[in-house]
Image (cartoon, rainbow, N blue to C red):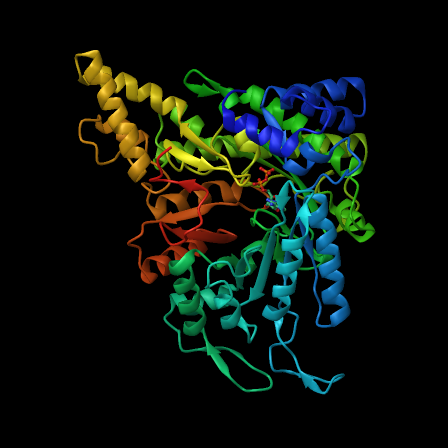
Amino acid sequence: MTGSLTTHILAARYLRDDENSFTDVCRRVADAIGETQREKETFFSEMHSLRFLPNSPTLMNAGTENGQLAACFTLPIGDSLPTIFDALKWGALIHQSGGGTGYNFSKIRPKASPVRELDGMASGPVSFMQIFNQATEIIRQGGRRRGANMGILNADHPDILTFIHAKEREGDLANFNISVMVTDAFMACIRDGKQDSVWTTHPATGDEVTVGDIWDAITGGIWKNGEPGVLFYNEINHHNPTPLLGEIDAVNPCGEQPLLPFESCVLGSVNLTRFVKEDHIDEVGLKQTTGIAVRMLDRIIDKNTYPLSRIETATKRTRKVGLGVMGVHDTLLMLGIPYDSAKGRVLCGHVMECITTAAVETSHVIAVESDSFPAWDNSRWNKCPMRNAALTCIAPTGSISLLADCSPGIEPVYSYAYTRRHTAGSSFAMLHPLFAQDLATAARDRFSSQPEVDQEINAVISHLRRTGTVQDINWLPASFRRLYKTATDISWKDHIRMQAVFQPRVHAAISKTINMPHSATDDDIAAAILFAWGSNLKGITCYRTGSRREVVYAIGEET
Ligand code: ADP
């Protein structure tokens, strides 16, 4: 591992007091999770080679006094103070241990409804979200990172407009991502132009909210600052592997895990760049790593220290794990295939199919060796023994992709040269190594003298730092520009197309940002959400360039 950012992340997040290197971290984690010496060695080797990394809580906490290893949790909230404040307390414990929580606040009665016990008026779900936000602010996870929440409200809740506007002012509910849960019936109204249909009526005041009111608030909110996200209830529940255990109304903070109340899920990601062999993907190696990763994630379920016994019970009933990929765009670059091309999508579909198939095979083998997950009898898997009710998803890999030094999840590279401000305060000048190499070749082909070559290379990098794109540099060959598109160069349709390639090939869901240009309108955003729904996605998160001040990647900043 090279590069100061990687070293910085390692020290700031993962090293314990008595550790000096990534090797130490891998050793600690493998020793804590592996059952036999052979298993410990296998797990160590997969992590140390950066072929596979489990989620941050495992890397931080395995083998320490805080043995909480999962990233994703969802907690139920009812319409009573005890259930609301129970969830607040449990959420605090989860954050303290390094996890993120998702909540659906829809059961809380709307603002201005009567409260019988007090002869007063209810304050509504959004007022309670403020308390959850504040609690998260206070509980910093051992100083390592701030907690994360997903707040969800169903579109038919009478407070839906207040909810959608709750983050309008930058800084409000800063520890929440918010999402509106919509049904197919709601989306059909949009598709069919039935914007005037009344979607929800306040039980006490009689105020009506139409489909159009909700839709305009959603698209307007996204235009303004990228929120809310939209979750597609029917698609999520259509793929619920254990429908008899109940419906799914919540997802974890970044959206990749729809979970039942009290379930938790440990994630892990295969670094696809490690499987590039000249002009193809080493599928044999990929399947082998997938098998080991599934065994490791499944072991973690038993080795984990759960923040609450109800979470342990719910998690062990379905034994869901979340195996995904990272380094997808880097892999495409290594193979010379544009992200937004049919060829790229075919390759990605094939790779994800390969991973999920191998994961299911391994889960089946473990079930035969030991047992299926306890709720298996009543699950959609009940024809074939399975250890885990769900195996694959696509996580953001925000931190572990930095450790592995690859592009995050299935996202396109944000910029090939930029300044990265780390939350700990330092900043790093980044230059993508493949880009740098191909740029040098292109410059040597085009310019004759070395000083000219150097000067043009520097000009490109400085242009990139300033603007984030090379698409407008005319001397660069068309094929170079075609390959080195960034997240903001790629059209929103192609972003969604890539998400749609992965979705049917993973069991759970996908964390992905659909980047839209600064010039995108409300209508473009509406079209994107409809396209996502029509593409059978489980949710969509859009971001219009420049609509938020606080961004981790700082383009235009000199180093
Ligand atoms: P990492 O790369 O650190 O393993 P990801 O960026 O892939 O993590 O995020 C995976 C999940 O971890 C998120 O969807 C969320 O549930 C949880 N998570 C991420 N960041 C935080 C945070 N700061 N606090 C709590 N949970 C988090």
> Vertical placement of 450 versus 361: above or below?
above
> Vertical placement of 252 versus 461: above or below?
below
Report whether 208 appears left or right of 148: left
Residue 452 position by quadrant: top left
User: What residue is shown at x 48% (from left), y 78% (from top)?
Assistant: 209
Nearer-the-camera pick, 286 or 424: 424
Q: Position of residue 141 (x, y in %)?
A: 68, 45
Q: Residue furthest top?
A: 449
User: What residue is shown at x 67% (from left), y 28% (from top)?
Assistant: 15
Nearer-the-camera pick, 138 or 208: 138
Nearer-the-camera pick, 168 or 532: 168
User: What residue is shown at x 71% (from left), y 34% (from top)?
Assistant: 364
Nearer-the-camera pick, 294 or 307: 307
Picture quarter with the N terminus: top right
Q: Position of residue 337 (x, y in %)?
A: 36, 28
Count of numbered labels shown in the rendering: 0
Report whether 187 appears left or right of 52: left
> Vertical placement of 16 versus 392: above or below?
above
